[in-house]
Image (cartoon, rainbow, N blue to C red):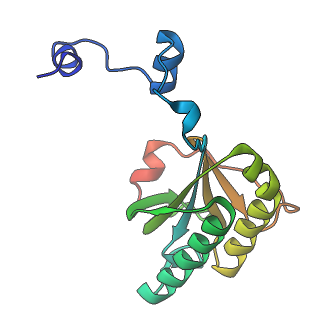
Amino acid sequence: MDKATNTFNNGGEPMPNLQDFLVEKKVSIPNANKMFHLPLEIAIYVPSTKDVDKKISSSELQTRVDEVSKFLAKNFGGFTLSDKVGGFISSKNKLVKEDVVPVTSFAQIKDFEKVKNELVKKMSDWATKWGQESIGFEFEGDLYYVPQKFAMGGSIKNHGIDDLLKG
């Protein structure tokens, strides 16, 4: 058993965030200056529903995933897919569970800066086209919900655990 696992199993602290670890310890990656670095991580969560909670066909989901994948590959050079199950409380206070496909891409800062406005507009358009209140957008570990229309504003209701447990 390695030292980190043994320490954790004996009640020690888990390993810190890698970035914090690298900064604190002044650790560098060998030959990093000879590598192609993509420091920004971006994920668009493609939903498997329309009109909040109506399941779509697998072919329609694949069409959505292909559209997002193509957009990210064109602008950032590639993408990665994964299948997940997500859930949220709708604006009508209903728990909605759905299959979701995060399409993830990594980018250089200059490339992201060039397309960030187009990217946000595209997600807003997808929300409208796909019958969604909003589209989940993860940027550097933070999750944003991109609404259909920004002019309408909007707010997020804070639901307690009792609201989540109600069917």
- Residue 87, can we see it? yes
Identify the residue at horizontal 48%, vertical 50% (top origin): 163
Q: Residue at x 22, y 18 (%)?
A: 8
- Image quarter in which the N terminus is found: top left
Q: Is residue 18 placed above or below 140 in the rendered structure?
A: above
Rendered location of residue 125, percent (x, y) = 75, 73
Q: In the image shown, does 150 or 115 lie closer to the viewer?
A: 115
Judge whether residue 95 can be spotted in this image.
no
> In the rendered image, which quarter is residue 78 located in?
bottom right
- Tell me residue 162's x, y (percent): 44, 46
Q: Residue 161 location in percent, x, y? A: 44, 43
User: Relative to the observer, which residue lies in front, 78 or 86?
Assistant: 78
Side of 14 relative to 43 (left or right): left
Please state the total of marks drawn on the protein image.
0
- Residue 50, placed above or below residue 102: below
Give left or right: position of 92 versus 30.
right
Residue at 47%, 27% (x, y): give it: 29
153 and 101: which one is in front? 101
